[in-house]
């Protein structure tokens, strides 16, 4: 029997073929569970064959792009594998974004086949008449239903073996600001993007993020290749997620920080049977120090934080259970990743100094699809001409090689000529026991140019108010860092991948704060 390690040594063009090999070796092993609906490897593999054969029947050629605008479902998994098996590239689209942004992504991709469900904005999908629309559920705005479109049962597609430079996927930015950019990955780059070891049969991974996000899609690939089981939900709900995870014997969870916050806030959390959990992984957004400490205290097993970006090149991991003294960091660069910190002039800075993080690895994008100018903007080359990618994140290295993040470059607040890093202010707010979540943005100020404004979410039963929270935080901050105001919200606006949508918070500040 082929081991998971052997599978991970293969070229990525064989990904769907390797899943077929898993299906031949262990057809009755459960491959995926979505909303308590299980499917074994044989079922998933047969669906992938029928999808690939149907695409070939319709004249789809290797190298073309097929888009998926849908929530997690068994059909999504089958389409993802089938598209790759037919030699096409897959473009999973973020369905939560604005319809006009989704429309631009579809047009940019040039997809001739679009798989959709009721969660996709119908007007955006209808705007591309050149594409054939296949409904994965009962949504009406499509040219055919999935069941009618599929090739007949037991149909096998013609074998296709993509080359290492052929397209594997295009992952689009959310489109919350500006024009969405498609991160292009070749077959070899996609394969190199692995940052974790494959799971093995008997292990069960619970995936909290959507399948159109790097974290969700990569976790699914890792699970299927290892012959393990992936557990997903169409929409994250903390109580339902934990019931499903426990019922299916989850051994590893891969969630965003806010999802861990919501799980830990469950009144029944400390009574749950968590004995099967071996590893908790957190990624998708910066994880506050206090949250990492709480997970370590209340949830048995290992805790690993992953830091990276869809474009690749930048990647780090913190084994928090081994280094509780480094919870303020995101760990060290992953094996195979070379990372540096540069200043505004592109010069490397010394250990301990803050600058922009850049990185390089085999796992990095060749560029943004159809966007050579945007590609050039994220590239940096060292003195020997080696190509690195800019992360847009500000941070520093300590003398042990651990990375501390201080925020996004675009989110840095310049107040009265001084640089203020939002993460310092957010940390000060989170030190107040009544605060469950916090974010700080720069608001326009006639006096200072920009001034820091804090937004907080309180824990149930909290007694603190906005004024007392501001006084608490400002008592821990330097004079130039102090918050000008604090506002209490029911929730922070976040993307499904867990990132705080700071543009929405800045919009709440108005034209001028003071």
Image (cartoon, grey):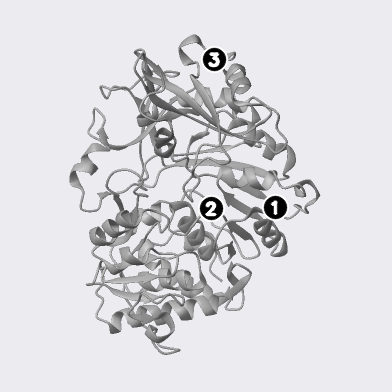
Residue 24: tell me if it is visible.
Answer: no
Mark 2 residue element? loop
Is disc 3 surrounded by few (<14), some (14 to 19) or many (20+) residues within 10 Å?
Answer: some
Residue that label 3 marks: 477
Is disc 1 surrounded by few (<14), some (14 to 19) or many (20+) residues within 10 Å?
Answer: many
Residue lying at the far left of the rendered structure: 373
Query: Which quadrant: the N terminus?
Result: bottom right
Depicted 80 relative to depicted 338: above or below: below
Q: Which residue is drawn at 48% across and 19% down?
A: 484
Q: In which quarter of the image is residue 33?
A: bottom right
Is disc 2 surrounded by few (<14), some (14 to 19) or many (20+) residues within 10 Å?
Answer: few
Mark 3 residue element? loop
**Which of the two discs, 2 and 1, sits closer to the camera?**
1
Give me the disc on residue 197: 2
Mark 1 residue element? loop
Q: Residue at x 26, y 56 (%)?
A: 104
Residue that label 1 marks: 277
Where does residue 383 sit, x and y in percent of width and height? 24, 27
Question: Residues under labels 2 and 1: Cα distance?
Answer: 17 Å
């Amino acid at each position: 029997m082929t081991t998971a390690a052997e599978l991970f040594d293969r070229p990525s063009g064989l990904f769907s073929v390797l899943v077929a090999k898993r299906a031949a070796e262990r057809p009755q092993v459960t491959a995926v569970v979505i909303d308590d609906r299980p499917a074994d490897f044989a079922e998933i593999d047969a669906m992938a064959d029928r999808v690939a054969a149907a695409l070939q029947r319709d004249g789809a050629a290797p190298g073309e792009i097929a888009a998926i605008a849908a929530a997690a479902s068994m059909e999504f998994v089958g389409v993802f594998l089938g598209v790759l098996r037919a030699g096409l590239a897959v473009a999973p689209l973020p369905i939560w974004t604005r319809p006009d942004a989704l429309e631009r992504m579809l047009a940019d991709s040039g997809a001739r086949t679009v798989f959709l469900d009721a969660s996709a904005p119908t007007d955006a999908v209808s705007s591309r008449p050149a594409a054939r629309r296949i409904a994965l559920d009962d949504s009406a705005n499509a040219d055919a239903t999935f069941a009618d479109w599929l090739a007949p049962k037991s149909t096998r597609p013609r074998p296709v073996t993509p080359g290492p430079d052929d397209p594997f996927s295009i992952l689009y930015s959310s489109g919350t600001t500006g024009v969405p950019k498609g991160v292009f990955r070749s077959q070899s780059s996609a394969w190199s993007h692995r940052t974790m070891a494959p799971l093995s049969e008997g292990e069960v991974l619970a995936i909290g993020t959507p399948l159109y996000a790097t974290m969700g899609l990569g976790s699914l690939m890792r699970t299927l290749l290892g012959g393990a089981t992936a557990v997903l939900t169409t929409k994250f709900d903390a109580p339902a997620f934990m019931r499903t995870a426990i019922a299916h014997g989850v051994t590893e969870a891969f969630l965003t920080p806010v999802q861990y916050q919501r799980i830990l806030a469950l009144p029944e959390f400390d009574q749950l049977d968590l004995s099967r959990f071996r590893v908790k992984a957190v990624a998708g957004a910066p994880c506050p120090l206090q949250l990492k400490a709480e997970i370590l205290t209340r949830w048995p097993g290992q805790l690993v934080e992953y830091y990276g970006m869809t474009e690749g090149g930048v990647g780090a991991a913190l084994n928090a259970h081994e280094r509780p003294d480094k919870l303020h960091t995101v760990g060290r660069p992953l094996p195979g990743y070379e990372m540096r910190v540069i200043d505004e002039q592109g010069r490397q800075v010394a250990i301990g100094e803050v600058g922009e993080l850049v990185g390089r690895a085999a796992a990095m994008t060749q560029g943004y699809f159809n966007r050579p100018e945007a590609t050039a903007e994220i590239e940096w080359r060292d003195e020997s001409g080696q190509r690195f990618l800019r992360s847009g994140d500000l941070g520093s290295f300590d003398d042990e090689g651990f990375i501390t993040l201080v925020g996004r470059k675009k989110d840095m607040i310049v107040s009265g000529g001084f640089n203020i890093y939002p993460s310092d202010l957010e940390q000060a707010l989170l030190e107040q026991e009544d605060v469950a979540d916090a974010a700080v943005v720069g608001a326009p100020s006639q006096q200072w140019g920009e001034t820091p404004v804090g937004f907080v979410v309180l824990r149930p039963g909290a007694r603190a108010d906005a004024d007392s929270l501001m006084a608490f935080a400002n008592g821990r901050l330097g004079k130039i860092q102090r918050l000008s105001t604090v506002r209490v919200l029911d929730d922070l606006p976040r993307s499904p991948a867990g990132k705080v949508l700071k543009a929405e918070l800045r919009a709440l500040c108005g034209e001028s704060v003071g």
